[in-house]
């Protein structure tokens, strides 16, 4: 089971709580997590990654295990602790600065 | 009961203001979509409980929301705006060609006859349409064939911000695009032509260029579909032949820079603008917030000041932030970047504040409810 933590605005949009639990077949990658999220909650399509290019939106970050995975390949397998559900995969709105 | 519903889009959410026909006591609902930029929301003329809203922010992009109960509840509909075919390119700041890239929806214009049909004006400038209540959006690509490769973004972005429908001719539409100009279709959106003759924009090397004019807003009275009024970057303009030729009607305005323009609901020659000092000083001249009204279709303007701040006022009024209701005594409404929404229930003679501390107001629309 993969535990995904969504930012507040996307929780409101999808009408879910802080965490979403997903069952994803191997290999579990960033792309697979977002695809499953979008399949289960179609209203999230386009809010995390582009509809057409599937590129992560510029001010979305992916964190897990104390690391910023945003610049990893979308097709790279996620850390083992995420695969076991011990650590969440966090989708985060980037700091606004200012 | 007859009344009005004012739909207010702000930098941090939507607000809905309602009143009976006396327009003296107001109920305020919101923020809806708190924290999101609501560039525009507008109701269907044929089903006033059907309202569409453009919701966006820099993190999560564009959403479109739809309400079927007058704004009490909302549900997201399709937010996929993909340019038709190969997107092509437009002129970029450095003179090179740059691919069209979708950024946001600036304006939603529900059809005059079908609640499921809505036009969406977007940045980078293009026109989209849904015919299934927002379940899918499709571009009308003929617009960008009207010399789109020569359009280039201005400081505010290359946005299609104004959509005007001709009630007497469903095949005719007008749109306006910042730093590109005004355009018209006579075949339901398949083909388009620039309608910018006479605009004479001093900001361009060729004042009479076919495209490149910075049109800020268009307005039309439903009974005179061939008569258009325009607030341009500078200059207030008028056309009496569906945009084939324009002439200036700025007359005695203290500044002819501004953003919105509106026409009285029952007097097709009565027009409203809000002069702004200049293109870099986006506030009222002399710190006095004045709506100007012409009862002669332009050229002769009178300042409307009763109830509006006449000193130390330095807010802006954006292009989509003024609207009129259709009650017998026509109501005029506008919102400011300072978060005030003002209204007049007597065609502009006197003004009062409905709310005064909202986030910066981006758009104001009014529904007159039977």
Image (tube, coloured by chain):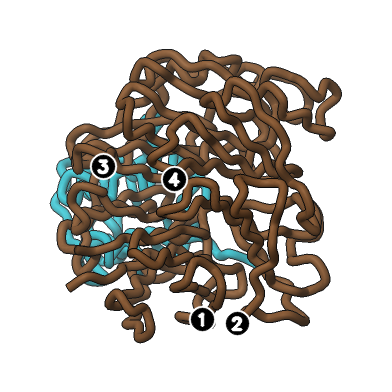
Query: What distance separates the C-alpha of mark 4 from that of mark 1?
Result: 25 Å
**Residue picked out by circle 4:** B107
- In the rendered image, what is the letter of the chain coloured brown? B
Q: Is residue B169 left or right of residue B76?
A: right
Q: Nearer the viewer, residue A85 or B182?
A: B182
Disc nearest the viewer among 3 and 1: 1
Query: Which is nearer the N-term, disc 2 or disc 4?
Result: 4
For residue B202, side relative to residue A6 (left or right)? right
Q: Are marks 1 and 2 in contact (CB under 8 Å)?
A: yes
- Residue A47 x, y percent position in the rendering: 36, 49
Which of the two discs, 4 and 1, sits closer to the camera? Answer: 1
Alpha carbon distance from label 3 to label 2:
42 Å
User: In the figure, what tint was chain A given?
Assistant: cyan
Residue at 37% over, 74% down? B31
SS type, badge 4: strand
How packed is label 1: few (under 14 Cα within 10 Å), some, or many (20 or more)?
some
**Disc 2: which chain?**
B
Q: Earlier in the sequence, mark 3 or mark 1?
A: 3
């Amino acid at each position: 089971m993969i535990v995904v933590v969504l930012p507040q605005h996307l929780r409101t949009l999808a009408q879910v709580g802080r965490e979403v639990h997903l069952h994803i077949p191997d290999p579990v990658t960033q792309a697979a997590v977002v695809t499953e999220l979008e399949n289960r909650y179609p209203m999230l399509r386009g809010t995390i990654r582009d509809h057409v290019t599937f590129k992560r939106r510029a001010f979305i970050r992916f964190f897990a295990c104390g690391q910023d995975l945003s610049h990893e390949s979308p097709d790279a397998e996620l850390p083992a602790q995420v695969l076991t559900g011990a650590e969440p995969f966090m989708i985060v709105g980037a700091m606004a600065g200012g | 009961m007859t009344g009005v519903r004012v739909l207010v889009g702000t930098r941090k959410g939507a607000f809905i203001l309602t009143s009976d026909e006396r327009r003296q006591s107001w109920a305020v609902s919101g923020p809806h979509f708190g924290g999101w930029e609501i560039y525009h929301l507008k109701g269907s003329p044929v089903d006033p409980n059907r309202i569409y809203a453009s919701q966006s922010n820099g993190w999560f992009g564009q959403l479109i929301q739809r309400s079927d109960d007058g704004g009490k509840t909302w549900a997201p509909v399709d937010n996929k705006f993909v340019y038709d075919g190969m997107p092509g390119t437009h002129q970029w700041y450095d003179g090179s060609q740059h691919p069209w890239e979708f950024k946001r929806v600036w304006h939603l214009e529900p059809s005059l006859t079908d609640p499921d049909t809505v036009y969406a004006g977007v940045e980078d400038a293009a026109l989209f349409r849904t015919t299934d209540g927002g379940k899918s959006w499709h571009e009308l690509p003929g617009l960008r064939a009207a010399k789109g490769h020569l359009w280039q973004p201005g400081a505010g972005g290359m946005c299609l911000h104004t959509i005007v429908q001709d009630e007497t001719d469903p095949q005719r539409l007008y749109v306006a695009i910042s730093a590109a100009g005004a355009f018209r279709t006579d075949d339901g959106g398949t083909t388009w032509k620039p309608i910018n003759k006479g605009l004479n924009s001093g900001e361009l090397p060729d004042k009479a260029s076919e495209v490149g004019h910075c049109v800020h807003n268009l307005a039309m009275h439903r009974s005179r579909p061939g008569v258009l009024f325009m607030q341009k970057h500078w200059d207030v303009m008028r056309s009496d032949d569906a945009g084939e030729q324009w002439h200036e009607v700025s007359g005695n305005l203290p500044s002819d820079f501004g953003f919105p323009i509106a026409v009285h609901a029952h007097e097709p020659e009565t027009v409203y603008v809000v002069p702004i000092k200049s293109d870099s000083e986006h506030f009222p001249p002399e710190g006095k917030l004045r709506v100007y009204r012409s009862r002669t279709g332009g050229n002769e303007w009178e300042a409307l000041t009763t109830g509006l701040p006449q000193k130390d006022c330095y807010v802006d009024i954006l292009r989509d932030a003024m609207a009129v209701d259709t009650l017998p005594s026509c109501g005029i409404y506008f919102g400011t970047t300072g978060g005030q929404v003002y209204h007049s229930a007597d065609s502009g003679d006197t003004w009062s504040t409905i709310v005064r501390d909202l986030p910066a107001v981006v758009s104001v629309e009014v529904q007159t409810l039977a």
